[in-house]
Amino acid sequence: MPPTNPPLRPPVRVVPYTPHNSTQGRAKTERTHLRPVRGAPPSKQQEPAPRPAVPGLRLINPPETSVQDVAEATARLVIEVLAGVRVPRHLDTRALPQVRSGVAAHQIAVAKGAKVAPPRVLSVRAQEPAPDVVEANAVVILAGHIQALAFRLERHRGQWRCTAVETTRPTKPKPKSASRQAG
């Protein structure tokens, strides 16, 4: 009898959570641990050092981007699709088809021409648990709510592709029943 494979997890998973008031029982903390991401206002970015010009030499292959840059760009792309400011097909070059369809299924419905609060990436952390594999997490603002985003990138044929995404979504508060209000 052939061995049975365990069921595969879906490529996109939304984890519902109930937000709580951060001022209850907590001290206000500074955000000194956050660093500006690419695309931040120029006042927060450092200017790159100028490259020395070498006559007679030219760049054949562009330098490989860091995994941190790839993770930041992927996080930005995923939340823009979730927010409805980007079409899901923009994920074609960065994500597997299953991830693209899963992210598209959780996209916020936006009326044509409606004003949408732009999504923002607050911080991104990336690590390489194995060669050609990056696991990253991000803290983002989506539809005015702070959310967590976790994703896995794998290198396929020299290009990083998103193979799994997990995100949180605030749950709607449950309406109180009439019997609880009376008592």
Image (tube, rainbow, N blue to C red):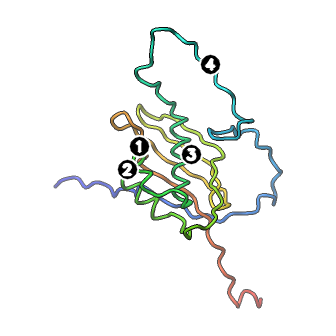
- Whole-angstrom CA distance, mark 3 to mark 4, is 31 Å
Q: Amino acid at mark 3?
A: Asn
Which residue is at a point 53% across and 42% down the rendered structure image? 73
- Whole-angstrom CA distance, mark 2 to mark 3, is 18 Å
Assess whether mark 3 and mark 2 are in contact (beta carbons under 8 angstroms): no
Q: Earlier in the sequence, mark 3 or mark 4?
A: 4
Q: Earlier in the sequence, mark 1 or mark 3?
A: 3
- Whole-angstrom CA distance, mark 1 to mark 4, is 31 Å
Quarter of the image where the C terminus is located: bottom right
Foreground: disc 1 or disc 4: 4
Q: Earlier in the sequence, mark 1 or mark 4?
A: 4
Q: Earlier in the sequence, mark 2 or mark 1?
A: 2
x and y, in percent, of residue 152 in the image: 46, 45
Identify the secondary structure beneath mark 1: strand
Which of the 4 image quarters holds residue 11?
bottom left
Bin the neighbour count of mark 2 within 10 Å (Cα to Cα): few under 14, some 14-19, many 20 and up. Answer: some
Which residue is at a point 64% across and 24% down the rendered structure image? 48
* Residue under label 4: 50
Identify the secondary structure beneath mark 4: loop
Identify the secondary structure beneath mark 2: loop
Which of the 4 image quarters holds residue 43?
top right
Residue 49's place in the image compared with 25, above or below, is above
Assess whether mark 1 and mark 2 are in contact (beta carbons under 8 angstroms): yes
Bin the neighbour count of mark 1 within 10 Å (Cα to Cα): few under 14, some 14-19, many 20 and up. Answer: many
Residue 2 marker: none
* Residue under label 2: 96
